[in-house]
Amino acid sequence: QIQLVQSGAEVKSPGASVKVSCKASGYTFSYYGFSWVRQAPGQGLEWMGWITAYNGSTHYAERFQDRVTMTIDTSTSTTYMELRGLKSDDTAVYFCARSAQFLELGGDFDYWGQGTLVTVSS
Amino acid sequence: DIQMTQSPSSLSASVGDRVTITCRPSQNVKTYLNWYQQKPGKAPKLLIYYVSALQRGVPSRFSGSGSGTLFTLTISSLQPEDFATYYCQQTSDTPRTFGQGTKVEIK
């Protein structure tokens, strides 16, 4: 069955970086992309960006453009999201979600990881 | 950015009730409109994609309709497991955006 399994919870200090992983299984990895979505405590869903497993192309939401990097490791069917310059309001659960191979296809987020809580605190 | 406005923000309903949630994108999103259900402490779950297509395994009491800038999610007969928060989402443009959520609570 299709699964996305994310890395465990992290506690970081302000100004630090965090790298969250998301390992996919149960389907042909290169046929899809991934979106990263975060959810602050008690808040809604916020899209951070997208990466395709086809060739590693990315598209980031403008508000994260300077601080986020998404990568793909096809050898392990894993995608990573690194967020730099952490602030207290980056405290959130970060989700990966399987998305369309190409952004122009639109698509939906049909499988999600379990989420990774990132806490930013001094 | 395309703003997604859901109404109501919350509602109280009883088991067996018919529930309708509305989503209004600020621009035409064509048919790139999806609905998700999220329960506390869990990842969102895709219910409906491309306005009205039911995701595999989702009960038929869930349905979606609409076009352009007005969409609805309907639960024909609310069940105990349906108490959750529901989000609409557009994938017509970037950034992908979600509605603020509609919390369905037990009356």
Image (cartoon, rainbow, N blue to C red):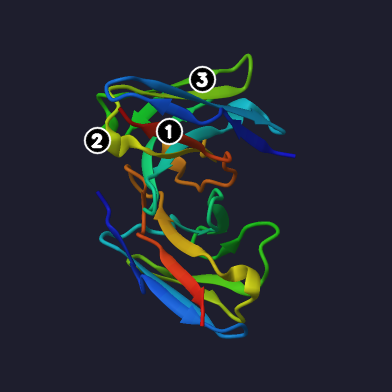
Q: Taking the image as drawn, is residue A61 in sight?
A: no
Q: Amino acid at mark 3?
A: Ile
Image position of B106 (left or right of B23): right
Is the residue at mark 3 from the same chain as the one at mark 2? yes
Real-space CA distance between mark 3 and mark 2, rounded to the nearest whole angstrom: 21 Å
Residue at x 43% of width, y 33% of height: A118
Real-space CA distance between mark 2 and mark 1, rounded to the nearest whole angstrom: 18 Å
Image position of A78 (left or right of A1): left
Q: What is the crowding at mark 3: few (fewer than 14 residues within 10 Å), some, or many (at least 20)?
A: many
Picture layout, residue A117 above or below residue A52: below
Q: Which residue is mark 2?
A: A63
Q: Which residue is mark 1?
A: A118
Q: Nearer the viewer, residue A85 or B45?
A: A85
Who comes first in sequence, dot 1 or dot 3?
Answer: 3
Is the residue at mark 2 from the same chain as the one at mark 1? yes
Residue at x 25% of width, y 61% of height: B26
Who comes first in sequence, dot 2 or dot 1?
Answer: 2
Coordinates of residue A101 in the picture (x, y in percent) = 52, 34
Picture layout, residue A19 above or below residue B50: above
Q: Chain under label 2?
A: A
Circle 3 — which element? strand
